[in-house]
Image: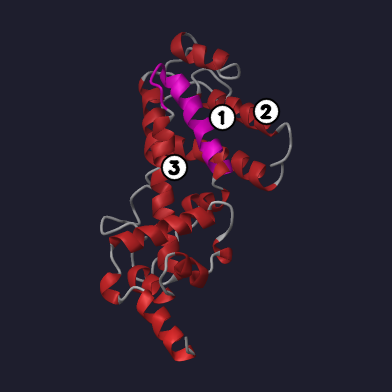
Amino acid sequence: MTTSSTRASVQTSAPTHAQYDATLRRGILDEALRRLRDGGPENLGLRPLAASQGTSTTAIYTMFGGKAGLLAAVGAEADRQLADELRGSLRHDSVEGDMRSLCRAYRRWALENEGLYGLVVGEPVRSPRGDMGGGPDDDDNVDPHWRGPLLEVVDALVDEGVFRTADVHETTTAIWASLHGVVSLELSVWRDSPSAEQYFETQLAAILRSWTVGGAGGGSSTGSDSGSGGAMSRTTVAG
């Protein structure tokens, strides 16, 4: 086969613009998700990614607006995956148990998806098309999907009097900040330490105790550490 015929064969085998459909878009997105689980965005090459799907980088620019748009779409998809993981961890046997299960699921997902974790909780990647990669419903003022399950559990803990009365959104943000801190330390400092899980459990106990009625964080409008709040304080470490 001549060089010209080989070139023609390659050109005709690549999808045309008319073939840039939802299936190809999904394939590119899924492969990008796979490649980014363990590595940062700087390691994602568009040319090999496109080649793995039998297409060219033109398809990525056409469907995602380039690398920034693709990363925005990956971040939006990873956000939904983390939200599903957190919601799936809720057993609903008790709100206290749900809180611990959710926090542990957050850590587990971050460890298993280190590269994606940065895209989910870091500064959102902006698509050159002006959205966040998730579709027309995106809004900079809307909380990420993964925050929903945490917000709901914190709201239930406050509503049941387990957590002291406080603004639910502010409480959720404070709890997440501590959770993110200990998870980030594990990813960057003590990932291979045999004590890493115990460090997390110790910090988790301290986080929950600080918000529990009568716990280390101070009193509440109830002025008592009895009842369900006291139970949370006593069982957090062991749970």
- Tell me which segment is drawn in magenta: 90-111
* Residue type at tag 1: Ile
Q: Considering only vertical position in the picture, is 223 above or below 7?
A: above
Q: Is residue 88 left or right of residue 197?
A: left
Indicate the quadrant containing the C terminus: top left, top right, bottom left or bottom right: top right
* Residue type at tag 2: Gln
Cα distance in 3D space between marks 3 and 1: 21 Å
Q: Characterize the local packing of mark 1: few (<14), some (14-19) or many (20 or more) Cα atoms within 10 angstroms.
A: some
- Residue 150 appears at what percent x and percent y? 42, 34
**Res. 112 visible in picture:** yes
Cα distance in 3D space between marks 3 and 2: 23 Å
* Residue that lies at the very extreme toward the top in this rendered image: 226
Label 3 close to label 2 by CB (< 8 Å): no
Q: Considering only vertical position in the picture, is 26 above or below 84?
A: below
Q: Which residue is mark 3?
A: 82
On residue 234, the disc is none
The residue drawn where x is 47% and y is 15% is 229
Q: Which residue is mark 1?
A: 207
Give yes or no for residue 163 being in the magenta stretch: no
Give the mark nearer the N terminus: 1 vs 2: 2
Q: Considering only vertical position in the picture, is 25 above or below 195?
A: below
Q: Which residue is mark 2?
A: 198
